[in-house]
Amino acid sequence: MIKNKEANAMTKNKLEKEIEGFLCHELKEHENSIGCMLEDEREGLREWVASGNSAHDNPFFMAFYNGGPMDYISAVRACKEVYEQRAETQHERQDGVGGPEVDKAF
C-alpha cells in the first residue's frame, strides 16, 4: 500500500512538472504573439500562469463574440476600456453633459 502511495505521489509530481512546463511554453509563445504589453499586463499574465492557468483564459470568465474564452491580456484590456468609458461617462454626467435621458440610464 505504501508503495502505491509513493508511486502515486511521484506520478502526481511528474504530471505537475509537465503541466508547469507546458504552461511556461504556452506563456512564452503567447507573449511573443501579443507583442507589445504594458509591464503591469505582463506581470499579471505571468502571475496568472504561475498559479496554474492558461494564458489563453482569464479570471473574469470573459468570452469573445463567438463564445470562445478571451485570453488574459485581451480580457484585462477590455476591463480597462470599460472602466475608462464608465469613468468618462460619470465625469460627463457631473458636468451636466448628456441631459436627463442619460442620467436615467445610470
Image (cartoon, grey):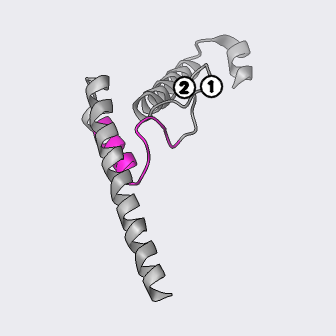
Q: Classify mark 1: helix, strand or loop.
A: loop
Q: Which residues are magenta?
A: 41-59
Give 102 or 53, whichever is nearer the viewer. 53
Determine the image quadrant of residue 42: top left
Which amino acid type is shown beneath numbered disc 1? Gly
| Mark 1 or mark 2, whichever is nearer to me | 1
- Depicted 18 relative to depicted 70: above or below: below
Residue 1 in sight from this viewpoint: yes
Q: Is residue 33 magenta?
A: no
Give 87 or 54, whichever is nearer the viewer. 54
Task: Give the mark, 1 or 2, whose residue is nearer the N terminus.
Answer: 1
Determine the image quadrant of residue 63: top right
Residue holding disc 2: 86
Residue holding disc 1: 67
Q: Which mark is residue 30?
A: none
Instruction: Give the Cα distance between marks 1 and 2.
Output: 24 Å
Which amino acid type is shown beneath numbered disc 2? Arg
- Residue drawn at x 50%, y 21% is 88
- Residue drawn at x 41%, y 67% is 11
- Residue drawn at x 44%, y 47% is 53
- Depicted 21 relative to depicted 45: above or below: below
